[in-house]
Structures are given as C-alpha cells and as structure tokens.
C-alpha cells in the first residue's frame, strides 16, 4: 500500500539522485576532490531530496538570484546559496573543467559524482551582505561565507555511496522518502515541525504542545539539526536522545511525536534560515512549522520576531508557519505560562539556556516546571556515554567523538 504523505515536496517532485550500483573502475578514473564535512552533508541532502528541488550545487545565476530575491531562477523560493567551493589551484591540479565529471570523496572514500556545469567566482562580501544583512566577520554565517575558497563548482550531484549513519543517530536519521512513508503510515495528515539544537526545557516542550494544538496537527516532528559544533553547544547525542525521551516518558503520546536528525551546518541567518528550515521540513512531509523567538538568529543581528515577519512576503511557500511567543515559568500562575496569556511579566522567569545550563552543571534538582527530571537524568547519562563527562561540547569531544556518518571504503550491496 502506498501511504506517501499527500503534501507535495518543494518544487513538486522529491529529488532522488542515488546510484545503487556504481562502476567502481570508472569512478577510479575520474578526477577526485576531497570535500569537508559540511559539503558531505550537503551532498546527502541534495541526493536524498532534503533540498528538493535542488539537484546539485548552484550555478552563478541561481546564487545571484537566491542572494538578491530569495528565489531560484526557476521561481521557487530558496533563501540560502548551496555552493561547492574549491581552491583554483586544487581544480587545476585535478585537471577539472566544465563538462567533466568529478568524483567527490569524503574521509578518503568515494561519496558522489558531480557533473561540472560551471566554474565561477563570486563576490563573497556581497553574498554575505545579502544573505545575512551584515558583513560583520563576527557573525558565524558571514565567517563561513568569507572563508569559502576562491572558486565555486556548480553541477548535478549523484551519490555513489550511501554513508553509514552511526549510533545513536541511526535510530533517528531518515531520508525524506522514508520519513514521508512513516508519517503516512501513522496517519499524520497535518504534521508540524519543530527545529531544534537543544535539550528540551519546559519552554520548548510547551511550545511544541501549544503549536501542535494551534495547528490542529496529527503529530509533532522534532527535526534536530546535527552538524558542526562549537565548544559549549549541547552534544549531538544529548539533543536527539533527550527530545525522543519526552515521547518515551509519555509527555507526548507515542502516536503524536517523532524525532529525526537533519545533517546541516547552521548558518544563523535568522529569518532567511527560518525560510530554509520551513522548506526542508516541507520536503520531510510536514504541513506546518513552528517558529518561536529569535529563530536561527545569533547575537542581536535580527529582530526578536524577524523570522515571523518574513513569511508575510512568501505566500507561495507551501508550508504553513505557526508563530509562537515565549513560554516562561511564572510562580504566580504556578507553572509554565505563555507570554500571550500570563499577566505577570514582572515576576516571570525566563527559561533561558543559561538557567537550564546552571541546573545541569550545578547538580541542583530542577523544579519540574523548568527541566524535567527525566530529561536531566538522560542528559547526565549522555554526558557519561558520549560526552567524556560533559553534556556540552568540549575540545576533547571535538577531537575524539565518534563521527555521525562514515563513508565506507567499498560498499557491499547487503
Ligand atoms: Zn503568570
């Protein structure tokens, strides 16, 4: 029985570009370029359709159009350039030109082929100005943009190896096709997405519950962004496991809550990244996406609710945004309260990351209104099992953690 979720992917067709039986000898003869983790993530996202309708890395016309108008040249909304940067010297050494097929390797092993349609340079400062509305090099997205190599290589990408997703992420990572099928089997006609890089505190939990009810949804899909880390972030393992822990302890019924992993290196592009998150979750089969305060922002580059306003200008997005104010702890109301309801803003306590961190670090038992005991126990378990004693990223974690994905040297069919 075909139980695909009825919602159309962005652009109408779910892109799938995976070659199950590549000719290994032919691949070995191609010029090869080794790609870093960010690009490997993006190859997977293109090939499995997370980035539908993109079929490859963007050419100059799409990059300019996306930067200036937030649309692809085809007219579909797309807010963030997806580009493959390669140093000119490396391209010359590999002997790569337009019309060639290049083998992209990761961890030294074949990952994907790229059919080169264009090689071009872009003004990185201008690109940053458009996408981030700032060129301040302290902004992590601007930093990422200014660090691009001097040339971009455009072209369609096809996976020649399906990487192994390592535990515990293997339980959560799904391709859009797999996820659409699972949501369909569960009967989720209306699925609302929650974007996270966090261990959930009560504010997050109630945001999910409130948005679920507002959307009259059949279920909440927690889409945890797994990618490049900096010291002090939550470790990836704690994020996915603690989100799913809310379901396994019954704070969400089993049939209305699922957690999945998205391999993406955050750009912190604020409102533009909110649009990007919406499009990717549309491709996962979600009909709605919730957005809270300062979505995907950093510092004070973007207004508190800038991510809410941007959707007004995008009526053809194809996924509904559910805009929520803040949930906080109010001792007068006697529990977790909503900014739009609670009349005690002077005594409310923000459920800020800092408070939650002090609970986790300090060993104090939290009030159940801030961080659930079940979450704290799980986070401590993750610290021991995956974090070298800390639920937060340390230098040691960055050096020694087990990678999320492994590209095997050669792949057996079964
Ligand atoms: Zn109150």
Image (cartoon, rainbow, N blue to C red):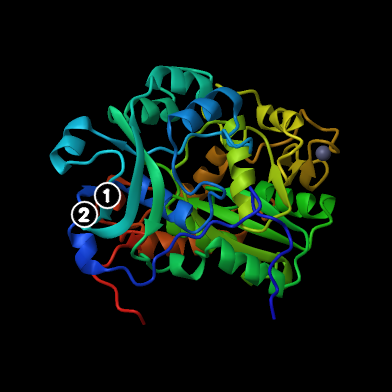
Q: Is residue 374 left or right of residue 369?
A: left
Q: Where is residue 136 in the image (x, y as percent from the top left)?
A: 43, 17
* Vertical side of 138 occupied by 181: above or below: below
Q: Position of residue 126 (x, y in %)?
A: 44, 17
Quarter of the C terminus within the rendering: bottom left
Residue 338 visible to the viewer: yes
Q: Quadrant of residue 218?
A: bottom right
Q: Position of residue 23 (x, y in %)?
A: 27, 68
Crowd band around label 2 with a 10 angstrom C-alpha radius: few (<14), some (14–19), many (20+): some
* Vertical side of 5 occupied by 131: above or below: above
Label 1 SS: strand
Nearest the eye: 133 or 341: 133
Q: Which residue is drawn at 23% across and 33% down?
A: 87
Q: In which quarter of the image is residue 228?
A: top left
Q: Are marks 1 and 2 in contact (CB under 8 Å)?
A: yes
Q: In this view, does 344 lie to the left or right of 160?
A: right
Nearest the eye: 94 or 294: 94
Nearest the eye: 18 or 310: 18
> Which badge, 1 or 2, is on the more N-terminal residue?
2
Label 2 SS: loop
Q: Which residue is drawn at 53% across and 49% down?
A: 51
Q: Residue at x 58, y 54 (%)?
A: 223
Q: Where is residue 143 in the image (x, y as percent from the top left)?
A: 37, 27
Residue 365 visible to the viewer: no
Between the residue at mark 1 and the residue at mark 2, the CA separation in whole angstroms equals: 6 Å
Crowd band around label 1 with a 10 angstrom C-alpha radius: few (<14), some (14–19), many (20+): many
Ligand number 1: quarter of image: top right
Residue farthest left in this picture:
93
Q: In this view, does 259 lie to the left or right of 36?
A: right
* Vertical side of 400 occupied by 321: above or below: above
Q: Mark 1 points at which residue?
A: 102
Q: Name the residue under label 2.
A: 30
């Amino acid at each position: 029985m075909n139980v695909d979720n009825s919602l159309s992917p962005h652009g109408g067709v779910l892109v799938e570009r995976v070659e199950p039986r590549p000719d290994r000898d032919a691949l070995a003869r191609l010029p090869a370029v080794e790609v870093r983790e960010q690009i490997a993530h993006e190859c997977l996202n293109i090939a499995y359709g997370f980035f539908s309708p993109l079929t490859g890395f963007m050419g100059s016309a799409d990059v300019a159009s996306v930067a200036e108008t937030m649309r692809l040249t085809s007219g579909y909304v797309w807010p963030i350039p997806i580009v493959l940067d390669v140093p000119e010297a490396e391209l010359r050494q590999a002997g790569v030109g337009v019309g060639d097929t290049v083998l992209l390797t990761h961890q030294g092993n074949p990952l994907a082929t790229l059919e080169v349609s264009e090689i071009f340079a872009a003004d990185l400062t201008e690109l940053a100005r458009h996408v981030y509305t700032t060129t301040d090099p302290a902004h992590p997205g601007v930093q990422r943009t200014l660090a691009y190599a001097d040339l971009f290589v455009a072209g369609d990408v096809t996976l020649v190896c399906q990487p192994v997703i390592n535990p515990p992420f293997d339980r959560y990572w799904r391709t859009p096709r797999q996820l659409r099928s699972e949501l369909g089997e569960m009967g989720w006609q209306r699925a609302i997405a929650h974007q996270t890089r966090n261990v959930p505190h009560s504010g997050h939990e109630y945001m999910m519950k409130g948005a679920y009810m507002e959307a009259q949804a059949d279920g909440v899909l927690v889409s945890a962004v797994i990618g490049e880390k900096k010291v002090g972030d939550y470790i990836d393992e704690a994020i996915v496991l603690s989100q799913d822990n809310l379901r396994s302890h019954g704070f969400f019924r089993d049939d209305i809550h699922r957690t999945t992993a998205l391999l993406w290196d955050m750009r912190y592009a604020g409102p533009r990244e909110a649009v990007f998150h919406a499009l990717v979750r549309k491709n996962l089969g979600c009909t709605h996406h919730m957005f809270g305060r300062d979505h995907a922002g950093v510092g004070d580059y973007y207004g508190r609710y800038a991510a809410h306003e941007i959707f007004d200008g995008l009526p053809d997005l194809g996924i509904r945004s559910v805009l929520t104010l803040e949930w906080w702890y109010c001792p007068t109301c006697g529990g977790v309260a909503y900014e739009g309801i609670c009349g005690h803003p002077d005594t409310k306590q923000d459920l800020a990351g800092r408070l939650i961190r002090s609970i986790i670090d300090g060993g104090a038992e939290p009030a159940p209104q801030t961080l659930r005991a079940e979450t704290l126990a799980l986070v401590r378990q993750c610290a021991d099992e995956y974090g070298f004693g800390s639920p937060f990223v340390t230098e040691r974690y960055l050096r020694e953690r087990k990678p999320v994905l492994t590209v095997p040297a050669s792949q057996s069919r079964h």
